[in-house]
Amino acid sequence: MKKKIHITYLQLLQVISLGLVKEIVKQNQLSGCQNLKPIKGAEYNGIYIGSPGRDIYFMLPYLSEKQMKEVAINMNKYFPKIPPKNNVNVSACIRFIYGQFEKQGILKSDKQFEKMKKKKPDWKLSRKFLKILYKIFEEQQNFYGLTILCEIEGHRLGDEALIYKNKKKLKEMEKKYLKCIEFAHNSKSYKHMFTPYFWAFKYFKKFGNKEKALKYSKLLIENANEYCERYVKTKELAYILRISESIKYIKEKSFDNGKKLFKKYKTKIKSKHLREAFRMAKI
């Protein structure tokens, strides 16, 4: 049985027109919303929090194919083509369309993993809609949009691979991350020229595939050295910790404890972030 609709179709189009990544939209900007009961988490101190990805997710069961296409066309109008300084809000918008309101999904914690295994998420409608959006991005040559779609779908495939212990899903995840990196080079999205290697490493590690986990750990180091500094100008700990985690894994799992690789990078480190990651890993 479908839940009561929380917003009208015309209001959904209006939310999208106000901007895909706006964190807050005043109620009086959205006609008719004053009398609506907003979805849980969509209102704070009387202010409607604009989250088109979240609204789209809850509206998907009520949309016809024609309406889905119209929503995707409207999203395309406002979706950035040039990578913004901060990708977080754009990525969150697509992540919300899967109904994933928590970052990192299964990789967040063992508790979150058990929760998702029990819930068995269903992303059929989300994928149906995003396939339409993907096709529009292809037609418009929005390589940044394609980068983000591939990144988030890679995460979801990785989640499914772990939930169902499915090697086929894991392979699909790998292909999707590599496609993400390919599009990133076309769109000059420097973040996505190295971070998908980290997520591939994490999913392969959790799946128990040491060979692939080592492969993507090494690719992360190599590409972070080249591209991390171009994206992260300041000393951001999150990226350093991720690279350091990969270095520690290589040190622990590779046949020579990573000596050959580490020797190479000791003399060829361009990135101060990579240098700091090596220091944190005690290399």
Image: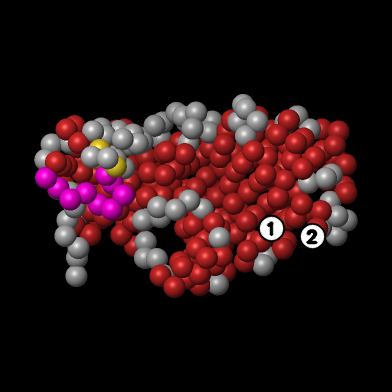
* Residue located 80% across and 40% down the image: 279
Identity, as a three-letter code, of the amino acid under mark 1: Ala
**Image quarter for residue 48?**
top left
Q: Label 1, secondary structure: give it.
A: helix
Q: Main secondary structure of the magenta part?
A: loop
Closer to us: 135 or 101: 101
Vertically, is 234 above or below 169?
above
Magenta-highlighted residues: 35-43
* Residue located 57% across and 56% down the image: 174
* Residue located 62% across and 27% down the image: 234
- The residue indicated by pointer 2 is 253
Identify the mark nearer the N-term, 2 or 1: 1
Where's residue 26, x and y in %? 23, 33
Image quarter of the N terminus: bottom left
- The residue indicated by pointer 1 is 213
Does residue 265 appear anywhere in the picture? yes
Q: Label 2, secondary structure: give it.
A: helix
Asked whether, in this view, residue 57 is left or right of residue 189, the answer is: left
Where's residue 25, x and y in %? 26, 34
Vertically, is 147 above or below 96?
above
Q: How is the image coloured?
A: secondary structure
Tally of numbered discs:
2
Image quarter of the C terminus: top right
Asked whether, in this view, residue 143 is left or right of residue 202, the answer is: left
Q: Are marks 2 and 1 in contact (CB under 8 Å)?
A: yes
Where's residue 89, x and y in %? 42, 38
Where's residue 49, x and y in %? 29, 40
As measured in the structure, the alpha-carbon distance from the residue carrying label 2 to the one carrying label 1 is 10 Å
* Residue located 49% across and 57% down the image: 105
